[in-house]
Amino acid sequence: MQPLGLYIQFPFCASKCSFCNFTSKVVAPSVYRSYIEALGREVCLALRSAVPGQLCPDQTPPEADTIYCGGGTPSLAGEDGLERIFQPVRRQFRLREPLEVTLEITPGSAGRDLLKKCAVLGVNRLSIGAQSFSDQELKCVGRLHSPSDVKEQVKLAREAGFRNISLDLIAGLPYQTLSSWQSSLEAAVSLRPEHLSIYLFEVDEKSRLGREIMHHESGYHAGAMPGEDFMAEAYERAREALGREGYQRYEISNFALAGYESRHNRKYWERQPYWGFGAGAHSFDGSRRWSNEVETEAYQARLAEGELAVAESHVLSDGEHVEEFFFLGLRQARGVSLSLAREWWGHSPFNWWEERVRQLQQDGLLTEKEGRLRLAENAYLLSNEVFQQFLM
């Protein structure tokens, strides 16, 4: 079995952003302790369970080589809380070096002492949710930080010894213009993070801003959204600006300096095994996907009863394996191996993908080089349409 990636979900934030479509919530800090205790119980119980995809008591604890603690804003747990989050994982799993341990933080949520504690706990990568370097854009979506807070957070992280920092930016926020977007890109690059994630705002009913746009309502600045052509231009500007500064696009939304690609996130795109812990966390063992109860109350209640909080579990069909191989793998700049696809499915009822590949190549949306199939340069903004062709 390949080394696992471990994901730990901390679903609490200091405020709820209008663009957020995750299941994070704002609660009193006193709630954190009971949730973290439930996390510890889940880690221990998962390693002693006969639930499909997880271990039975007589099996050796598996190896893991990446840990990602996200949310939410896990830095809100504080020094003691983070120690209690990471301790069961380090105790229960065999951790293989080199180990990548990522912690998500929001600007202003991690001071010097917390960052030093993170380093002691083995955190060696920070993912900072900058989102924008415009005060207006940040305030209108409910962010509590300012552009100067982002710069100060990076400064503190560097002083604490962190040499692997990622910044998130979002294109398509209310009041955003190409000029303000360019300024955000320049400000982010000036901080010289090793990694940048460029996300395009998606209209999703799970977010307050998304619902407002869909239902033509007002209150979350939907009327100030950029025009229809903005996204394509914003993405192209990001690609060009980051490319000039040495950041290579290795996945549709992710750019990195050489050697600083996210090893944990690559597990998702390459369908490597990963286990998720926490409310709403997802897992995959190579054949089965399962997910936990989304609501923290239901998650904690089930673990308090001594059972895992798995809400859904599904064994992938052969056809679903084919679908995922292409629509996840093609997200990456290095694409997918055609020889591997043919070895697995070339002589089976599931070789329907061959004709679709040929058609997409004829349409100029896919290219093949040295046996690997990739999105064409002009197809990145049409990627969802390409991926849909691999759904049965």
Image: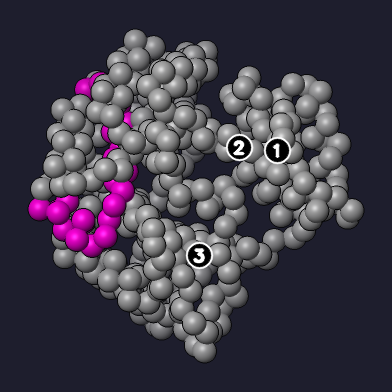
Residue 277: in magenta span: no
Lower position in the chain sequence, tag 3 or tag 2? 3
Is residue 159 placed above or below 317 in the rendered structure? Answer: above
SS at circle 2: loop
Q: Which residue matches tag 3? A: 3
Q: Which residue matches tag 1? A: 372
> Horizontal and vertical percent for residue 286?
63, 63
For residue 188, say whether it is visible.
yes
Q: Which residue matches tag 2? A: 334
Mark 2 is on which residue type?
Arg
Mark 3 is on which residue type?
Pro
Query: How far apart are the alpha carbons under marks 1 and 2?
Result: 7 Å
For residue 222, say whether it is visible.
no
Quadrant housing residue 36? bottom left
Mark 1 is on which residue type?
Arg
Answer whether labels 1 and 2 touch (C-beta < 8 Å): yes
Identify the image quadrant of the C terminus: top right
